[in-house]
Image (spheres, rainbow, N blue to C red):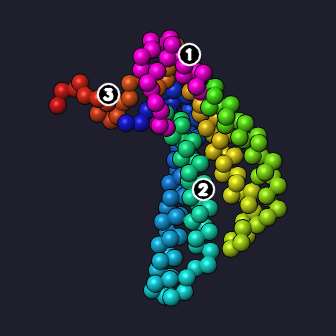
Amino acid sequence: MSRDPEEHTSGRWLGWLLCLERFAAAGMLMTILATMGAQVVARYVFHKPISWSEEWARFALIWLAFLAAAFVMAEGRHIAVDVVSSRLGTRSKLWLECVSSGFVVGTCLLLLVGGFRFVWRVGLVDSPALGIPMSWWYGAASVGLGLMALHSTCSTVAAFRRGQPVWDLPAVDDEGPVGGGGVS
C-alpha cells in the first residue's frame, strides 16, 4: 500500500534517494541479523564470544532507526491522528498539511542545528570496541533529521503544485485502489 514517491516529489532524484534509504536500512537490518547470529554461534558453539559484535549491532540499529524514519516520512506512514483533518474540506486540509509540515521541518532543522555542534565535539572520542568516532554514531540523527526535513518540504511543495493534500490522495497497491470497490 505504498504511494509512488515520484508521484508526490519534485523529481526522479528523490525517488532514487528513497531507494537508497530503503537499501541502506535493509543493509543495516541484515548487518544486525548477521552480527548477532555470528555472536550466538561464536558464544554457544565455539565458546569464544566476539568482543565487538554487540557494539556493531547497536551502531547499525541507530542508523537503521533514523534511515527508516526518513523514508517512512517520505511515504506519509508515520502515525498521525486525523481527528481534525478528516472533518475538513480539500483547501483546509491543504492548509493544515502545510502548517503541520512547517512544524515538522522547523523541528527537524532546530534539532539538526542544535545537535550538529554536539556531533562535532564527540568526533574526538572513539567507541570502545570498534574505535569508530562517536560522531558517526550521533551523526545518524543528523542525517535522519535532514532527510526528514527534505521529505517533508518536498511533500509540501507537491501539495501546492497539485492544489490538494498529498496524503489525501487515494493509496494504490499493485491491484488497484486500496479499500475495496473493485470487482473480485
26 sits to left or right of 141: left
Label of residue 163 in the image: none
Q: Is residue 134 located in the magenta-colored stretch of the structure?
A: no
Residue 100: image x %, image y %?
58, 25
Q: Which residue is mark 2?
A: 62
| CA distance for labels 2 and 3 | 35 Å
Judge the density around disc 3: few (<14), some (14-19), many (≥20) Cα neighbours within 10 Å: few
- Residue 168 visible in image: no
The residue under label 3 is: 177
**Residue pointed to by mark 1:** 95
Which secondary structure dominates the residues rendered in magenta? helix
**Residue 73, x across and y down, in percent:** 54, 37
Residue at image coords 76%, 40%: 113
Q: Is residue 93 magenta?
A: yes
Mark nearer the N terminus (1 vs 3): 1
**For marks 2 and 3 on the same chain, the one whose residue lies earlier in the sequence:** 2
State which region is magenta: 77-101
Residue in the picture at 45% in, 14% down: 88
Give the residue type at disc 1.
Trp
Q: CA distance from mark 1 to mark 3?
A: 25 Å
Q: Name the spot of residue 52 as percent of width and height, x first.
A: 62, 74
Element at badge 3? Answer: strand
Q: Secondary structure at mark 1?
A: helix
Is residue 114 visible in this depiction of the protein? yes
* Depth order, front residue of 55/21: 55
